Structure formats: C-alpha cells, structure tokens
Image: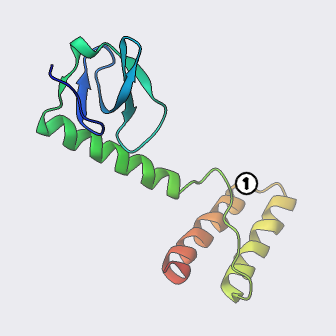
Amino acid sequence: MTALERGALVYDPATRKVGEYQDRSGPYAMLRPVGGGREWQADPAALRPATRRERLSAGVRAANERARAADDTSRPPLPVRGCATCEELAARREVARAGYDGSTETDANVLLRRHHNREHRA
C-alpha cells in the first residue's frame, strides 16, 4: 500500500474492521474506529483501502452506536423542572420503586422518555 494520509479509511484484515488511519507508531499503523473510539495497532503492509461497501457499513455501524448511546436506557430519565407531565410520571415511578413494582417503574420510565422525545427535544 502507498503512503497513508491521516483520515484515510482502510480495511484491517487482522481485525476484519475498517479504521481511520491516524499515524505510524514504530512499525505499526495506528487506526481508530469510524466514529471514534480506542485506537488499535495494525500491520501497515496488510492494510488496503476500504471498499465503498465497507466504508458505508462502518459509517452505519457508527451512527447506530451514537443513536444507542443517545438513548441510554441504563439510567432513568430526569423530569424537566416545571413540567406537570414530567413531575406526574416521575412521582408514579417513585411510588412504584418504593413498592418494589419493577414493571410499573419501567412503564413510567418509558412514558417519561416518550414524553421527553415529543415535548422537550429541540
């Protein structure tokens, strides 16, 4: 492969992933996942330009990961101060939590997220 330019998308057959070329580090090429993440070392002689399909697939994967991160359901949504609907759903969730009713607590979280998406997203 010819000299790589920073930002070039290349395919690493060792990991079977597309990476964005960052720089050289000793005998290795440093690649970063499309969309960001932890860099990895690759053999520069084994790299090749990513095909159109591979670039598209890596881009879609990165977009999906960003979307999942934005809709992080591991933490309960917070009510917006001054919004009666948010406060009612948060109160419903707290009553369910106090009564160890996980199903109703989850329902309240889902309803609060839906409300946030409809009413409070800019």
Identify which amino acid the numbered label 1 is placed on: Gly
Residue drawn at 70 percent across, 62 percent down = 104
- Residue 91 drawn above or below residue 15: below
The residue that disc 1 covers is 102
Residue drawn at 53 percent across, 83 percent down = 119
Residue 84 in percent (x, y) is at: 71, 88
Toward the viewer: 23 or 59? 23
Q: Dividing the picture into quarters, in which one does residue 78 lie?
A: bottom right
- Residue 12 drawn above or below residue 111: above
Residue 34 in percent (x, y) is at: 34, 40
- Residue 33 drawn above or below residue 82: above
Image mark count: 1
Residue 88 in percent (x, y) is at: 73, 81
Report the coloring of the rendering: rainbow
Residue drawn at 45 percent across, 29 percent down = 39
For label 1, the crowd category at 10 Å Cα-Cα, with few meaning under 14, some 14 to 19 and many 20 or more, is: few
Q: Dividing the picture into quarters, in which one does residue 25 lie?
A: top left
Please state if 90 lies on the left or on the right of 46 as rendered: right
- Residue 60 drawn above or below residue 31: below
Q: Dividing the picture into quarters, in which one does residue 93 lie?
A: bottom right
Toward the viewer: 61 or 118? 61
Toward the viewer: 52 or 79? 52
Please state if 5 lies on the left or on the right of 49 as rendered: right
- Extreme residue in the left direction: 52
In the rendered image, the quadrant that contains the N terminus is top left
Please state if 65 lies on the left or on the right of 87 as rendered: left
Toward the viewer: 114 or 53? 53
SS of the residue at dot 1?
A: helix
Residue 32 in percent (x, y) is at: 39, 33
- Extreme residue in the right direction: 98
